[in-house]
Amino acid sequence: MPILQPLGRTFLLFLEATGRIVLFTTTALSHCVRPPIYPRLIGRQMIEIGYYSLPVVGLTAIFTGMVLALQSYTGFARFSAESAIPNVVVVSITRELGPVLAGLMVAGRVGAAMAAEIGTMRVTEQIDALDTLATNPFKYLVAPRLIAGLTMLPILVLIADIIGVFGGYVVSGYKLGFNPATYLKNTLDFVEPQDVISGLVKAGVFGFLVTLMGCYHGYNSRGGAQGVGAATTNAVVSASILILCFNYFITEMFFAR
Amino acid sequence: MTDRSANSGGDDTVPKIRIRGLHKSFGDKVVLDGLDLDIGARQSVVVIGGSGSGKSVLLKCILGLLTPEAGSIQVDGEEVVRMNSRELERVRRKFGMLFQNAALFDSLPVWENVAFGLIQGERMERGAAKKIAIEKLAAVGLGPEVGELSPAELSGGMRKRVGLARAIATEPEIIFFDEPTTGLDPIMGDVINDLIVKCVRQLGATALSITHDMASVRKIADRVSLLYDGKIIWHGPVGEIDSSGNPYVDQFIHGRAEGPIEMQVRAI
C-alpha cells in the first residue's frame, strides 16, 4: 500500500498535467486561426527562431555530416562498401539527424528563451497587464511563437540538410579520396523526395513542440526567479523528450512496412 | 480628493461597480468571505487592509484575472463573473490599471507601452497612437525623450508615472490602482498621488485603489473601505475616517500592533 499510494498520486498528477497541456494547446491553436493575427509579432518570432538559430543549426549540421562520412568510411571499409557512404550520409541527414539535431538545438536555444521571457512576464504581472489592456495573451504571446516555430523549423532543417550533405562531401572528397562529382551524383541519385519530406514534416512537428513547451511552461510559471528557472529547465527537458518520442512515431508513420 | 459623485452618500442609483457576496479561497485559506462593496460613478474608493488581507485578490476578481467561487460582480449593471473571454475583453476596454510594480513590457519602448491599449486594443494607427502616448507622458510630467527609452532604464518613480500614463491612455471609465505609492520615497509618493488625483479628475473616471499608505488614502480617496477577515467591515467618507468610532479602523490608521486586528505572525 505505501508503494501504490505515491505511484497512484504520480499517475494522477501526470494525467492532470497532460490535460492541462491539451487544454493549453487547443486554446493556443484556436487563437492561431482566429483574427486578429499579429503579422509584426509573427515576423519578429520568425527572425528570432529562424535567422538567429541558423549559425548553431548550421554548425551542428556540417560537423554531423563530416563525422558521419568519417565513421561510415571506417565501418564500411571492413566490407569494401565505401561507395555507400554518400547514400548513408544523405539518408541519415535528411531523415533523422537533420530534423532531430536541429530540433534539439532550437529547444535549447529558443525553447529556453521563450520559457524565461514568458515566465518573467508572468511573475512581473506583465501577462495580467496584457489582459487588462484587452489583449488576449494567447493571441499576443503564444500564437505568434507557435506559427513561427511551425514554419521556420522546416526551413532551418532544409538548410541543415544541405549543409550536412556538404559536410560529408567535403570530408569524402578531400580526406577520403572520393571523386567529388561521383559523390554528388550518387547522393542525388539515391535520395528520394520522401526522405526530405519526412524530415520536413518532423521539423514542423518539432518546431511546434519546442515553442509549445516554451510557452506552456513560461505561461504557467509561479514563484519568482526560482519558478522561472524551473520553467526554463522543464521547457527544454520536455521538448527534448517529446522530440525523441514523436521522432519515432513519425518515422513509423512514413517508413514502417 | 473632493467627492465628485452624485450618489456618494447613498445607494439610490446603480453603482458603477457592485459586488455582492464575493467568495474566493485558495485551498483551505478563505481570502474573501462574502464581500459586499458598491462604487458609485466618478467616485474614488480606496480599500485599505493589512498585508495578505485579500485586497489584491479583490482587484483581480473585478478585473477577471481570478474567478471567485461565489458572488456577483457587476460593472455598469452587467454581470462579469464567468463572462466568456470575448465579452470580458469588451468590458475591460472600460478599465485602466496601474500595477504595483508598473508591469511595463520590457520588450517595448516606453511610448509603445503607453500606446499599447490604443494600438492593440483599439487598433489605432501607430503614428497617431505615438502622438497620444507623448501627450499622456507629458500629462504625468515626462518629456518626449523618455518615450524612446526602454523600461529597464527608468527609476521606480518614472516607472510608476509611465504605468499611470498607460492606465489613462485609452481614457478609461474605471481606473484601478494597486499600491500606487509602494516602494517610493514620501515625496515621489506624494507626486504620484497628485498625478492620480489630477488624471482621475480630468477624465471624470471612477477609481478603485488598494493601499495601506494612509497618506495616499487621505489624498486620493472620496470614500474608504476597510477589508478585514474577507469582508468590508467599515465603509465611509474619507473625512470620517478619524472619527469612525470603529476600533479596527482606529488601529489600522494609527498603525498600532495592539488591537482587534490580529496580524498573522509565524511563531519562531
Image: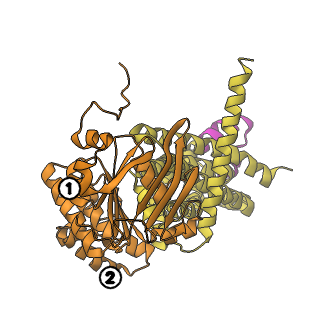
- In the rendered structure, which segment of residues is drawn in magenta? A68-90
Query: Height in image: A199 above or below B171?
Result: above
Q: Residue at x 45, y 39 (%)?
A: A227
The main secondary structure of the magenta stretch is helix
**Left or right: where B33 falls relative to B49:** right
Q: Position of residue A92 (x, y in %)?
A: 67, 48
Q: Position of residue A65 (x, y in %)?
A: 57, 48
At label 1, the amino acid type is: Gly
At label 2, the amino acid type is: Ala
Closer to the camera, B102 or B107? B102
Q: Which chain is orange?
A: B
Q: Residue at x 59, y 45 (%)?
A: A239
Is circle 1 on the same chain as circle 2?
Answer: yes
The residue indicated by pointer 2 is: B128
Closer to the camera, B179 or A208? B179
**Left or right: where B109 falls relative to A148:** left
Magenta span includes A240: no
Subunit of mark 2?
B
Query: Does the rendering let one see residue B197?
Result: yes
N-terminal label among 1 and 2: 2
Q: Which chain is yellow?
A: A
The residue indicated by pointer 1 is: B157
Query: Height in image: A16 above or below B2?
Result: above
Magenta span includes A69: yes
Mark 1 or 2: in front is 1
